[in-house]
Image (cartoon, rainbow, N blue to C red):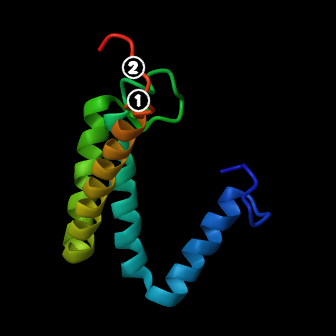
Amino acid sequence: MNAKMPSGLYGYQEALITIVMGLVLFGVMEMFSSLLLIIAIQLWDDYVDYNSDRYSIKNWAFILGKNECLLLGIIFFILSVYLDYFKALSGIFSMWIIVYIIKLWFNYIDKPQNSGEEVPGE
């Protein structure tokens, strides 16, 4: 959040401007349900990354505890569903699709390209 962004502003300044613009343009409840969904997805991501980010001080699963992080993420997701079920469900489905595409992409990158050379061990 303290890093300079391409706009020249700090991360926290961009976040604050985005929240204020969202409140003005879309209203309090719309922004609140969106923030709940963002927090739920962030907590789920930290829960999934618990083993790989084991020594990171920025991982909420490490700070709160792995199960507590998952439980809090579920609570935030349920609150988001309560406020706007269509947005919450489409956001979660989009998250799963994006994760799947990224896994496919990384699997494609990790495979050796067929350049006519024989790959050792095959």
Q: Nearer the viewer, residue 94 or 55?
A: 94
On screen, residue 10 versus residue 122, left or right, reads right
Could you say where residue 80 lies in the image, as x and y percent from the top left? 27, 66
- Give the farthest residue toward the right: 8
For residue 17, above or below residue 92: below
For residue 104, above or below residue 25: above
Determine the residue positioned at 28% across, 36% down: 68
Could you say where residue 20 lies in the image, as x and y percent from the top left? 58, 78
For residue 12, above or below residue 62: below
Quarter where residue 36 is shown? bottom left
Q: Nearer the viewer, residue 68 or 11?
A: 11
Kindly identify which numbered label has been placed on residue 118: 2
Rate crowding at label 2 as few (under 14), some (14 to 19) or many (20 or more) other CA atoms within 10 Å: few
Q: Amino acid at mark 1?
A: Pro
Q: Which residue is mark 1?
A: 112
- Label 2 to label 1, Cα distance in Å? 10 Å
Q: Nearer the viewer, residue 23 or 47?
A: 47
Rate crowding at label 1 as few (under 14), some (14 to 19) or many (20 or more) other CA atoms within 10 Å: few
Determine the residue positioned at 27% across, 57% down: 97
- Quadrant including the C terminus: top left
Q: Amino acid at mark 2?
A: Glu
Determine the residue positioned at 42% across, 38% down: 109
